[in-house]
Image (tube, grey):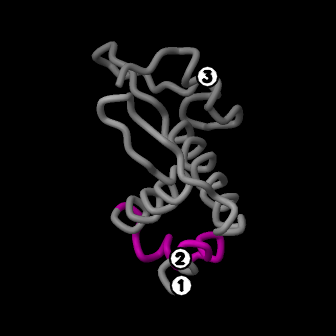
């Protein structure tokens, strides 16, 4: 993915000690990479959406028709998002992160 200045600047933490709020790290070979504070902010947004969807009534969601006339199908976007977030988190986060109190909704999904 190509990260431009606008994307990283909007997501960067203003008090970051590494990127100083720019959201990009500049390397000696003149290349740039997004700072970790940008990835943390993206995770916070995704996790907040996950928590919001977990608090909703499961009977409140409706299937949506996706595709076109030739290849249409039904899907439940909210449930798919929750399932994808849970599986990616289970694969990516370490056991220490999974045990934190902030991650309790993740354990609630696996138990129920």
**Residue 2 horizontal side relative to residue 47, left or right:** left
As rendered, which of 10 and 81 lies closer to the eye?
Answer: 81
Q: Which residue range is magenta in the image?
A: 92-106
The label shown at residue 9 is 3
Q: Name the residue nearer the viewer: 54 or 1.
A: 54
Residue 68 x/y as whole percent: 38, 28
Q: Which mark is residue 112?
A: 1
Q: Quadrant of residue 19?
A: top right
**Residue found 43% across the figure and 21% down from its top:** 3
Asked if labels 1 and 2 touch by Cβ distance under 8 angstroms, the answer is: yes
* 22 horizontally vs 90: left or right: right
Q: What is the spatial separation of the Cα atoms under label 3 and label 2, in whole angstroms?
A: 34 Å
Magenta highlight on residue 96? yes
Mark 2 and mark 1: Cα distance apart in space:
5 Å
Foreground residue among 100 and 1: 1
User: What element does badge 2 sit on?
Assistant: helix
Asked which quadrant contains residue 20, the reply is top right
Nearer the observer: mark 1 or 3; the answer is 1
């Amino acid at each position: 993915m190509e990260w431009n200045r606008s994307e990283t600047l909007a997501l960067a933490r203003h008090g970051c000690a590494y990127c100083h709020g720019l959201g990009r790290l500049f390397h000696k070979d003149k290349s740039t990479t997004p700072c970790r504070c940008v990835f943390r902010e993206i995770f916070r947004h995704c996790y907040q959406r996950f928590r919001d969807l977990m608090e909703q009534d499961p009977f409140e969601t409706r299937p949506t028709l996706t595709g076109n006339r030739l290849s249409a199908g039904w899907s439940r976007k909210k449930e798919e998002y929750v399932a994808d977030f849970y599986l990616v988190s289970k694969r990516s986060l370490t056991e220490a992160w999974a045990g934190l109190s902030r991650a309790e909704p993740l354990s609630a999904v696996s138990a129920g």
